Amino acid sequence: MNLKSINLSILSSVLFMSIMTSAQVTIDEKDNLLKESEFSPEILAATKVTKDGRVKIDGVAAVVGDYLILESDISKAYLDMRNQQIGEITYCDVAETIMENKLFAHHAKLDSLPFNPERVASFTDQQINQFVSQVGSMDKLLSFYKIDTEDELREQLNEINTQRMLAEEMQGAIVDEVEITPEETRDFFESIPEDEIPLINDEVELAQIIVKPEVGEKERQAVVDKLNSFRDDVLAGGSFATKAVLYSEDRGSRSSGGKITLTREDPYVKEFKDAAFSLREGEISKPFETEFGWHILTVDKIRGQQVDVRHILLYPEISSEAIEKARKEIEIVREKIVNGEVSFKDAAREVSDEKETKESGGQLINSATGDRRFELTKIDPAIYGQVVDLKENEVSPVIKDTEPRTAKVFFKVITVTKKIPEHVAEFSKDYTRIRELALQQKKLKEINAWKAENAEDTYIKVNGDYKACEFAKSWIKQ
């Protein structure tokens, strides 16, 4: 489950799975009972306690190293995955996945892998901001999940994120140096039975030109003046957080009073980080501009390499005249491309306002694969409708669109530079895809070998019905 894009149904499972304890577990092998004193009230509430103060093991699905996994944890994760329609899954599949993650996290701690708690705190802050934005307020979020305080929510999410990131660090360390050679890629492809060679779905290569309305000096100055007035009010004793809630156009942080926690390594734009790390606690910056708009920022607290800041973001108004001017500009550009007066590439280099694609002639790169091809069935639905009927090198009509972060209007035209029909994979034509599959298989083999070796050296116990799962044979020591 990807917590950066988590929705509310997944959040339910994630919050409840926080009761997976990280305390050291002691099991009495003689009577197969757990000591009551080992566990938190949440765990005891989910299990059965005997008269002599021991916990029956039938409420515990498995123990992996320092981690205990409850049957209820597996049930909740299973139901949420079913609700999310994550393919065909069984309780055994879910149990194995959770146990594997606990094994990775356990050994990451044992191996003292480099781990930054500040990264966890920063990610948790971003999560909470996202959740609050989804439900409307912190009070609604706490009420819905029956959690008393924001600190309690933060503590639970920190525990979840710590375990997840530890597991990711361990897996990364296992496969960090795994590489694939062209010879190995060819061997992998040639080892696939002919009737099992993968089918490559319809793919396209795309390019686009974007024209954004220009912000006038009058509108820019109006934003700077408004931010300066906010700054003056705060310096005179007003509340920065209240002004952020009322006026900031940053949807992600507005509901929490503009609060953001960050480190120098976090992926914020340079101007924002420069302001965050140049101020002392309590200081307020003067208005400054980033690619997202104009900000003022104050530092709430400095904690080593991590800072808690609050900011207010405003976007300059775009005049109707500027919008009309941008529309006419891209219509003229499109007409010249269609008439053959200029190539799409040259036009993109000359007029496109998209920095990432301008120099490549507007060519889009698939971030998932690193190459130019986009599988048509997996493409963004909004883009799919714009390109599905285009022929190669045909230019779309002018498309009016809005930026996700700012909701500001811009205009674009798209062309399909190449269409690749559905076909059985060929080594030369689909080398990038085949290499990706070969590398994934090699990494999986490396991880499976690591699991087999380290499961032998880790205290693992599987209980109840989960002993009958196929995977349990390799986890239970004979």
Image: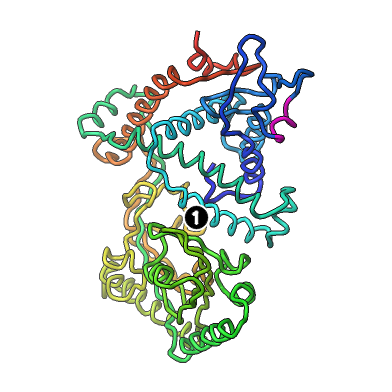
Residue 45 falls inside the magenta stretch: yes
Which residue is label 1 attached to?
122
Q: Is residue 49 above or below residue 16?
A: above
Please name the amino acid that badge 1 sits on.
Answer: Ser
Is 28 in front, or is 431? Answer: 28
The image position of residue 333, as x and y in percent, is 34, 76
Q: Is residue 322 above or below residue 258?
A: below
Q: Is residue 241 above or below residue 92?
A: below
Q: Residue at x 51, y 63 (%)?
A: 308
Is 196 in front, or is 116? Answer: 116
Q: Residue at x 75, y 23 (%)?
A: 48
The image position of residue 298, as x and y in percent, is 50, 73
Q: Is residue 449 left or right of residue 102?
A: left
Query: Badge 1, how many Cα within 10 Å: few under 14, some, many 20+?
Result: some
Q: Secondary structure at mark 1?
A: helix
The image position of residue 108, as x and y in percent, is 42, 34
What is the count of numbered marks?
A: 1
Q: Is residue 252 left or right of residue 209?
A: right
Residue at the far left: name it. 183
Is 15 in front, or is 152? Answer: 152
Residue 358 falls inside the magenta stretch: no
For the record, the magenta segment spans 41-47
Q: Residue at x 59, y 15 (%)?
A: 467
Residue 254 image-quadrant placement: bottom right
Q: Residue at x 59, y 59 (%)?
A: 129
Q: Main secondary structure of the magenta part?
A: helix
